[in-house]
Image (cartoon, rainbow, N blue to C red):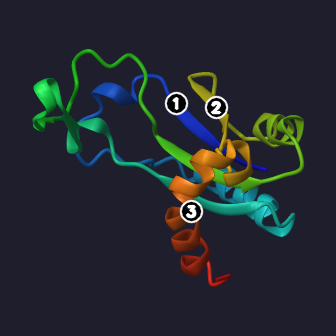
Amino acid sequence: MRFMMLMIPKGYEMAPPGTMPEDVERIAAMMKYNEAMQQAGILLACDGLHPPSMGARVSFPDGRPVVTDGPFAESKEVLGGYWMIQVASRQDAIDWAKRCPASETETIEIRQVQEMEDFPDTVQETIAPIAEMQLQRQGKG
């Protein structure tokens, strides 16, 4: 089972452009955590994200794309980064999230990735080209 662990740092929604982590001890602790997941063979990907002030949103009112540059005033929670992990169960994902050296202002949301076998057969037929593309990208197809 694949899970996304989404880091939600309180206050990051209004961080100015170019804001980067600077606390070397916290960064070192997070790198040690990432390394533990890698050594356990569960880490598929992980990245930090620039603040929303450097981002954009594309919405589709009336079916037409409208671009809004960040920051986004209505945002209460934003992503600061993510991990993609592959573990045996939801509980395993929770256990790994609990090991994160997060601060009191950070929350990790855990979401299971939709796998091909989760869909009904009729939908699997429709999305089969995407699954094949993913396998080729991973070097498995």
Name the amino acid, label 2: Ile
Q: Quadrant of the rendered structure where residue 89 is?
A: top right
Secondary structure of residue under mark 1: strand
Pointer 2 residue: 108
Of the two numbered discs 2 and 3 on the same chain, state the one appearing first in sequence.
2
Answer whether residue 25 is visible to the viewer in this image: no
Between the C-alphas of marks 2 and 3, the distance is 31 Å
Answer whether residue 132 is visible to the viewer in this image: yes
Please tell me whether residue 28 is drawn above or below residue 21 in the rendered image.
Answer: below
Secondary structure of residue under mark 2: strand
Name the amino acid, label 1: Ile
Name the amino acid, label 3: Ala
Q: Position of residue 26 (x, y in %)?
A: 61, 46
Q: Residues within 10 Å of mark 3 (few under 14, many from 20)?
A: few
Q: Determine the residue positioned at 53% across, 56% down.
A: 127
Please tell me whether residue 127 is drawn above or below residue 141 in the rendered image.
Answer: above
Between the C-alphas of marks 2 and 1, the distance is 6 Å
Q: Do the residues labelled 2 and 1 touch (CB within 8 Å)?
A: yes
Q: How crowded is mark 2: few (under 14 residues within 10 Å), some or many (20 or more)?
A: many
Secondary structure of residue under mark 3: helix
Q: Determine the residue positioned at 81% across, 43% down.
A: 96
Q: Position of residue 67 (x, y in %)?
A: 11, 38
Pointer 1 residue: 8
User: Given this view, does label 2 or label 3 mark the residue nearer the observer?
Assistant: 3
Please tell me whether residue 36 is drawn above or below residue 61 in the rendered image.
Answer: below
Q: In screen coordinates, is 85 left or right of 61?
A: right
Q: Residue furthest front?
A: 122
Pointer 3 residue: 128
